[in-house]
Amino acid sequence: MNEEQQPETRAIRGQLAATQYREHSAPLFLTSSFTFSSAESMAETFAGNGEGIIYSRYNNPNVDELIAKACALEGMEAGFATASGMGAVFASLAALVEQGDHIVATRAVFGSTHQILTQILPKWGVTFTYVEPDQPDSWPAAVRPESKLFVTETPSNPGLQLVDLERAGEFCRAHNLTFIVDNCFATPYLQRPGDYGADLVTHSATKWMDGQGRVLGGLLLGRADIMEQVTFFCRHTGPAMSPFNAWVISKSLETLHVRMAAHCQSALTLARWLGEQRGIARVHYPHLESHPQYDLAKRQMTAGGGIVTFELTGGEAAARRLLNSVQLCTRSSNLGDTRTILTHPATTTHSKLSREERSAVGISDGLVRMSVGLEAVTDLQQDLLRGL
Ligand SMILES: *Cc1c(COP(=O)(O)O)cnc(C)c1O
């Protein structure tokens, strides 16, 4: 990797060295293990000194290429790629805590992250406290002597609440907490938490990084010393990403910057347009002037992202009507695709929460989440009008 090049150049040119065939596009190394020229070289590699690769649960050329590109984009030192985003989130927590530890987390974390905090880690004696994402002054009250990690996500899914990363960095340094950010919604194209002192960034590469709804993947990217601990955990517990998925996502990173620019532009156009339509009570989008954290969003994110949410005045019935009327937009729970996707969080992704829990993270009965794809905006507008 040429450290002097811009991140988008490195995401294109930071590919594996060509084999003897001088191929232009990196080939797929679909192999579980690798061979050694001698017993000595094999022993050296196992001792951690050799140049060889041992086994694809540890390393694989395609996976290594993806990690190198993602580190360049996030400005991080080291990484590990996992089979899914949740594999990365779980490893980021499980690798860094021990019995008796405590985690401070911002309330609006991803649904499965909430399940890990509430159902899985407590079995091992690890507890947590939620703090309000938009009230950093209240965070220190949640810190205990045994607090180890600060876990956050910005913008949140689907509430689009923001966490001030600069304040979060100061908070973590003041209280000696490891600072972990799920940067899935923003991608490194919009914000780099490492610039604010984040020690570890996780991604669901399933979303904008693949960007075409094909494969699952996750990434852990961070400071070298933290990643040493996390990599040890991952190598011996087995959440490794398949070489095929790494190959797909690595190719996708070559176009992340152009795709994200287009997603964000269409999302802003649609957010403004939705605000003018009848039957819509509120539109939420970080770069819309009406967003309660608009100033922070402008300061922290280079663009508003590809997710727009809106609340229909007709509540759940109106949301159902909209989802049943569209012919171009798809009803699906994924996000970060070339195809525009509509979801009704209250009856799907967040149906397990009580109505009070949902409203605490900004999910009303009439809320619709739209992951804006790359279709022509005029076609999307025409389609949405069928159901509004
Ligand atoms: C989807 C998602 C995840 C989980 O990723 P998977 O690849 O589905 O396991 C984690 N965090 C956020 C913010 C997500 O949107």
Image (tube, grey):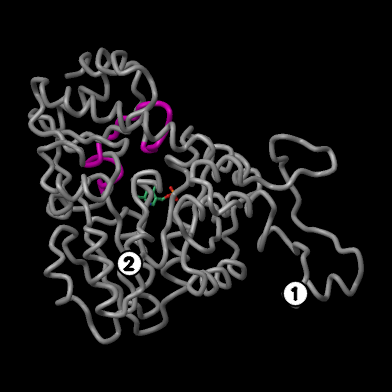
Disc 2 on helix, strand or loop? helix
The mark closer to the camera, 1 or 2, is: 1
Q: Specify the label residue 49 is tagged with.
A: 1
Front in this rendered view, residue 117 or 294 = 294
Q: Specify the label residue 303 is tagged with.
A: none
Three-letter residue code for mark 1: Asn
Residue at image location 26% in from the left, 71% down from the top: 104
Q: Does 86 sit above or below residue 297? A: below
Q: Is residue 266 left or right of residue 51?
A: left
Q: Is residue 137 left or right of residue 170?
A: left
Q: Is residue 103 left or right of residue 363?
A: right
Front in this rendered view, residue 94 or 45 = 45
Residue at image location 28% in from the left, 14% down from the top: 378
Residue 55 forms part of the magenta stretch? no
Q: Quadrant of residue 23?
A: top right
Q: Residues within 10 Å of mark 1 (few under 14, many from 20)?
A: few
The magenta region covers 333-351
Residue 54, horizontal then vertical, whole percent: 75, 64
Where is mark 2, residue-wise? Answer: 117
